[in-house]
Image: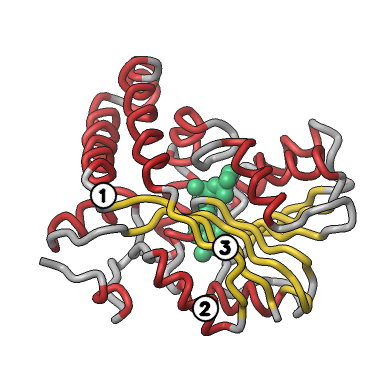
C-alpha cells in the first residue's frame, strides 16, 4: 500500500507542461467544458463567488487567477464586483479563447490574460491583492514553488484563495498511478500538505475545508451527464475510443471518490 506521506517525499508522475498544453490545445478543455460549464471547476459561479467572498474581493481588488483556462471565473468576478482580474494560463488555445470571449462580453477593460507557467509567474513582486485558483493546481508539477510564486506576486496582507483536487485516503500504487495518469496529474496534494506548504511560504491559514463529499456527488453528476447527454456528441466529434477512455477514467474517479480516496479542498491564507 502507498502511504500518503510518500507524496511529501516528492513522488510524482512524469507529466510536464507540454502534456498540459497537449490536453488543453486538444479536446481536453472542450470536453471538460461540456461536463462542467465555462467555469471548469466543481460548483460553477457559486463556488467562484464563495471563494471571492472569503478572500474579501471588492471593486478595488486586483486578482490573479492562476490557471484561468477559458476565463469564465475571471469574467464573472469582474461583472459581479467590478474588480480587475488577470488570468494566467500556460495553454495558448485557452488564453486565445479566453480573450475572445472576454472581448465579446465587452470586459477587456477589466479582464486580461497572460500566457505563462504558474511556476514562473510573469509578474513583479507585490502586483496583486488576491491570488485565486480553482481545481487546476493538481496539474502543476511543483506545488511548493507554485505557492512561493503566489506569495511573491501578492502584496503585504494579500490573500491566496483556492480549491483543488486532493488525495484524501490511502490507495494502492496502481490506484495512485491510474487515477493521476488518467487526469495527467503529476501528483495530488493532500489538504494537510497544502496547509504545510502555505505555512512554509509565510502564509497565515485563514480557512481549510474538506469538500470531498460534495466532490463525490459532483463526480456522479459528471458521469451521468457524459453517458446521458454527451455520449453521441463525443463519439461523433472524437470517436468511440475517446468516449470509452473518458467513461472508464471518470468511472474510476467516481469509485475512488466514493471510497474516500480522492476529493477536493479549499484553502484561504493571508500573506503576513
Ligand atoms: C481545469 S482547467 C482550469 C479551470 C479554471 N481554473 C476554471 O475554474 O475555469 C486547467 C488549466 O490549467 C492550466 N495549467 C495547468 N498547468 C499550468 C501551469 N503550470 N501554469 C499555468 N497554467 C497551467 C491548463 O492550461 C488549463 O487551462
The residue singled out by tag 1 in the image is 260
Q: Secondary structure at mark 3?
A: strand
Q: Residue 37 placed where, x, y %?
A: 55, 31
Disc 1: residue Cβ within 8 A of ligand 1's nearest atom? no
Crowd band around label 1 with a 10 angstrom C-alpha radius: few (<14), some (14–19), many (20+) = some
Q: Secondary structure at mark 1?
A: loop
Q: Residue 213 placed where, x, y %?
A: 37, 42
Q: Residue 50 placed where, x, y %?
A: 65, 45
In the drawing, does residue 220 fall left or right of residue 172? right
CA–CA distance in space, label 2 to label 3: 21 Å
Q: Do the residues bearing badges 2 and 3 touch, measured as CB atoms within 8 Å? A: no
Which numbered disc flags the more N-terminal residue, 2 or 3? 2
Q: Is residue 75 visible?
A: yes
The residue singled out by tag 3 in the image is 207
In the drawing, does residue 121 fall left or right of residue 5? right
The image shows residue 116, relative to residue 29, as above or below, that is: below
Q: Residue at x 14, y 63 (%)?
A: 173
Q: Residue at x 26, y 31 (%)?
A: 247
Q: Residue 256 placed where, x, y %?
A: 23, 46
Crowd band around label 2 with a 10 angstrom C-alpha radius: few (<14), some (14–19), many (20+) = some
**Where is the N terminus found, in terms of image quarters?**
bottom left
Task: Look at discs 2 and 3 and give the one toward the viewer.
Answer: 3
Q: Nearer the viewer, residue 101 or 25?
A: 101
The residue singled out by tag 2 in the image is 145
Crowd band around label 3 with a 10 angstrom C-alpha radius: few (<14), some (14–19), many (20+) = few
Q: Secondary structure at mark 2?
A: helix
Amino acid at each position: 500500500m502507498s502511504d500518503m506521506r510518500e507524496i511529501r517525499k516528492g513522488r510524482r508522475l512524469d507529466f510536464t507542461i507540454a502534456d498540459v498544453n497537449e490536453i488543453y490545445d486538444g479536446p481536453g478543455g472542450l470536453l471538460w467544458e461540456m461536463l462542467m460549464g465555462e467555469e471548469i471547476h466543481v460548483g460553477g459561479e457559486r463556488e467562484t463567488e464563495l471563494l471571492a467572498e472569503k478572500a474579501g474581493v471588492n471593486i478595488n481588488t486586483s486578482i490573479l487567477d492562476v490557471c484561468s483556462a477559458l476565463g469564465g471565473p475571471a469574467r464573472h468576478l469582474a461583472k459581479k464586483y467590478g474588480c480587475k482580474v488577470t488570468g494566467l494560463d500556460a495553454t495558448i488555445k485557452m488564453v486565445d479563447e479566453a480573450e475572445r470571449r472576454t472581448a465579446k462580453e465587452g470586459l477587456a477593460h477589466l479582464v486580461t490574460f497572460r500566457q505563462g507557467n504558474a511556476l514562473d509567474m510573469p509578474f513583479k513582486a507585490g502586483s496583486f491583492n488576491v491570488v485565486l485558483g480553482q481545481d487546476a493546481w493538481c496539474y502543476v508539477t511543483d506545488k511548493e514553488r507554485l505557492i512561493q510564486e503566489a506569495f511573491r506576486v501578492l502584496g503585504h496582507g494579500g490573500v491566496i484563495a483556492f480549491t483543488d483536487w486532493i488525495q484524501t485516503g490511502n490507495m494502492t500504487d496502481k490506484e495512485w498511478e491510474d487515477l493521476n495518469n488518467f487526469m495527467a496529474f503529476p501528483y495530488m496534494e493532500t489538504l494537510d500538505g497544502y496547509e504545510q506548504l502555505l505555512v512554509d511560504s509565510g502564509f497565515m491559514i485563514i480557512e481549510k475545508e474538506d469538500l470531498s463529499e460534495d466532490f463525490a456527488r459532483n463526480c456522479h453528476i459528471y458521469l451521468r451527464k457524459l453517458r446521458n447527454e454527451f455520449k453521441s456528441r463525443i463519439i461523433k466529434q472524437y470517436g468511440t475510443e475517446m468516449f470509452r477512455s473518458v467513461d472508464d477514467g471518470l468511472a474510476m474517479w467516481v469509485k475512488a471518490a466514493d471510497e474516500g480516496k480522492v476529493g477536493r479542498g479549499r484553502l484561504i491564507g493571508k500573506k503576513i
